[in-house]
Amino acid sequence: MKIKSVRARVFEWKGKTVPPQANFCSNAMDALYDRGDSMKTFRFHGWTVVEIETDDGIVGLGNVALAPHIAKAIIDQYLAPLVVGQDPWDYEYLWQRMYRSTLAWGRKGVAMAAISAVDLAIWDILGKSVNKPVFKLLGGRTKERIPCYYSKLYRGDLKAMQEEAQTFLDQGFTAFKMRFGYGPNHGTRGVAENLKSVEAVREVIGYESDLMLECYMGWDLDYARRMLPRLEKFEPRWLEEPVIADDVDGYAELSRLSAIPISGGEHEFTLHGFRQLLDKKAVSVVQYDTNRVGGITAAHKINALCEAHSIPVIPHAGQMHNYHLTMSTLASPMSEYFPQFDVEVGNELFYYIFKGEPVAKDGFLQLDDTLPGLGLTLNTDYLDQFQISE
């Protein structure tokens, strides 16, 4: 079996969108003096879909959500020539070939996300070629089902947040993640608003449910130092990405300062990046995303590294490429989960492009032992809502 072709297409959403409220999540742009919605630069209403076909007709699907047009150009110009004509079972060799050939200008960011998309498609081929789900190739089932946490509690009207939390509490969820809407530039009023939002959610879910708090890199080290003591009484399971991803020493300092676990890794890449995080004891929870970190080939190694350090892995964003890794390792105790909903920021486009995502029931996800590969197919129901670039 040889790889015959690599096709990368950009799917840009042209359908209905629901604009998120201002300050629905703090973020790194908050450090600047932009007077508008600082999160407006983060809308990603496009997605790159990769289809790799073998000479015996198997088609593997991969995807990348970061900078889709740039990712497509990298795949078309640099990565496809490296894998066409090769045996997909030599996946480690192919990964190293892509990684090392782009090392001078790649390593992290969109270049690694592009490699991830190709790697995902290769693993989809491998599963389909032996009629097994990918998690079976990675070690098999380590859980009867996957616990998951509800992750769409964006900061907005507090009453609406409480009603949303109650809805999914009633559906059996026992873990929830909410976003902070304010950071250092919002002053003491922002501090008060942040604390009010945590208190409001805890009021609904109580202390028998886990509560995770996300900053999305919207704080700085000084602000995080001041916030941690105020947050301890709410007993969060973790505080996510309090500072920018490059401030590894800042993460390490915060991890030493408080009993609140610090999480991160959504914006880290490759085994080398996570070795540095763990060597510095910078995070207590690792949150890579398989379609960014280097694909399944890289993520599988990171899982082993984290297991050796007794650091849990809870991948970013849910989605099938992450669920297969979560199912196949004891290092990963649970998954993030978003229900299908109207297009807002862009994460939700995954459900409009692909079919096959499991729906949570009573706070758990299940994978099908009989679905080969990643278990995804292209969703044709919404094709007229996309502009597709070849």
Image (spheres, rainbow, N blue to C red):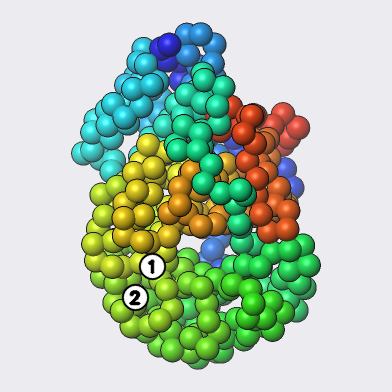
- Which badge, 1 or 2, is on the more N-terminal residue? 2
Q: Nearer the viewer, residue 342 or 336?
A: 336
Instruction: Name the image quarter holding the N terminus.
Output: top left
Q: Nearer the viewer, residue 336 or 113?
A: 336
Q: Is residue 180 above or below residue 286?
A: below
- Calculate the distance from the C-alpha at mark 1 to the C-alpha at mark 2: 8 Å
Q: Is residue 101 left or right of residue 211?
A: left
Q: Are marks 1 and 2 in contact (CB under 8 Å)?
A: yes
Disc marking residue 255: 2
Instruction: Name the image quarter holding the C terminus.
Output: top right
- Look at the numbered disc 1 and give the secondary structure of its residue: loop
What's the residue at 38%, 49% (across, down)?
A: 303
Provide residue 33's location: percent of width, then percent of height: 44, 74
Provide residue 45's location: percent of width, then percent of height: 59, 46
Q: Which residue is mark 1?
A: 284
What's the residue at 63%, 29% (across, down)?
A: 371
Q: Quadrant of residue 107?
A: top left
What's the residue at 43%, 78% (across, down)?
A: 260
Q: Is residue 376 left or right of residue 302?
A: right
Amino acid type at circle 2 is: Ser
Other-residue count near label 2 (Cα within 10 Å), few / some / many at <14 / 14–19 / ≥20: many
Provide residue 333's location: percent of width, then percent of height: 51, 57
Q: Is residue 244 left or right of residue 172?
A: left
Amino acid type at circle 1 is: Ser
- Look at the numbered disc 2 and give the secondary structure of its residue: helix
Q: Is residue 45 visible?
A: no
Other-residue count near label 1 (Cα within 10 Å), few / some / many at <14 / 14–19 / ≥20: many
What's the residue at 54%, 11% (across, down)?
A: 57
